[in-house]
């Protein structure tokens, strides 16, 4: 029997998908259609738009970045993923970062809009890629196609230099900057893994 799809707010791939293929992890992700994305968002985030910001990426390719970076679909997760994709772009500028913050907090429709509390996660994503994946231009790589889809997540991460411990370090920063949210609580950090191990042992006593 195939694995049941989760609701969008439940889905979070985490970082321990190493031995699954990219396609296998994506198959667990709740479906979304590109045409559901509002026009104002497509203006700045669709790579075919003349006003697209650095790192603008197709929805299918964007979903692949969620898997590689182990983040779910809450707005806080989206902020990190968009930031990381922009930060990995070779043409990223401070002006583009400021523009995205402005439009995402003021012009995007309410259900899609970032709040000030989401901006630290966005900046963390930008910083993560600038520090660890400079000029990788992830948005230009057809991850939604072969051979990428048949590669394991471990193989794809290794190709781009995505190191789980570096991600966990940024996740720990997120816990400090944005504490207590559901997205922060389920981040895959080494501290969480130790706590979970202790809980499992205590449950068995």
Image (spheres, rainbow, N blue to C red):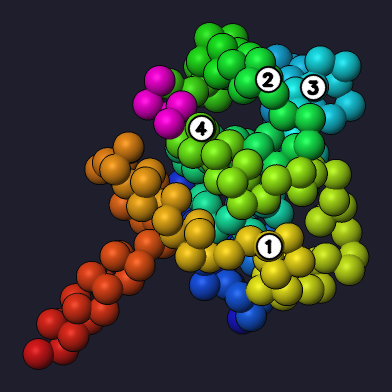
Q: CA distance from mark 4 to mark 3?
A: 19 Å
Disc 3, SS = loop
Q: Say if the magenta span includes residue 118.
A: yes
Observer-side mark, 3 or 2, equals 2
Q: CA distance from mark 1 to mark 3?
A: 26 Å
First reached walking from the N terminus: tag 2 or tag 1:
2
Q: CA distance from mark 3 to mark 2?
A: 10 Å
Up the image or down, 27 lies above or below 48; here it is below
First reached walking from the N terminus: tag 4 or tag 1:
4
Q: Main secondary structure of the magenta part?
A: helix
Mark linked to residue 128: none
Taking depth in this image into account, of 174 and 184 the one nearest to the observer is 174
Crowding near pointer 4: few (<14 within 10 Å), some, many (20+)?
some
Crowding near pointer 2: few (<14 within 10 Å), some, many (20+)?
some
* Bounds of the magenta segment: 116-120
Determine contact: label 1, label 3, CB under 8 Å: no
């Amino acid at each position: 029997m195939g694995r049941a799809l989760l609701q969008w707010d439940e889905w979070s791939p985490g970082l321990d998908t190493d031995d699954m293929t990219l396609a296998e992890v994506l198959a667990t992700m709740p479906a979304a259609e590109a045409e559901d994305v509002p026009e104002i968002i497509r203006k700045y985030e669709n790579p075919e738009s003349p006003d697209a910001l650095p790192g603008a990426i197709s929805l299918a390719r964007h979903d692949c970045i969620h898997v590689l970076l182990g983040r779910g679909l809450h707005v806080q997760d989206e902020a990190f993923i968009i930031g990381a994709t922009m930060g990995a772009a070779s043409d990223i500028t401070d002006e583009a970062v400021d523009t995205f913050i402005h439009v995402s907090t003021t012009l995007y429709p309410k259900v899609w809009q970032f709040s000030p509390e989401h901006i630290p996660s966005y900046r963390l994503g930008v910083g993560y890629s600038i520090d660890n994946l400079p000029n990788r231009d992830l948005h230009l790589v057809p991850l939604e196609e072969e051979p990428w889809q048949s590669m394991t997540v471990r193989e794809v991460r290794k190709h781009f230099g995505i190191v789980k411990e570096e991600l966990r370090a940024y996740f720990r920063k997120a816990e400090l900057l944005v504490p207590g949210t559901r997205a922060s609580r389920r981040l895959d950090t080494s501290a969480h893994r130790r706590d979970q191990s202790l809980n499992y042992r205590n449950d068995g006593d």
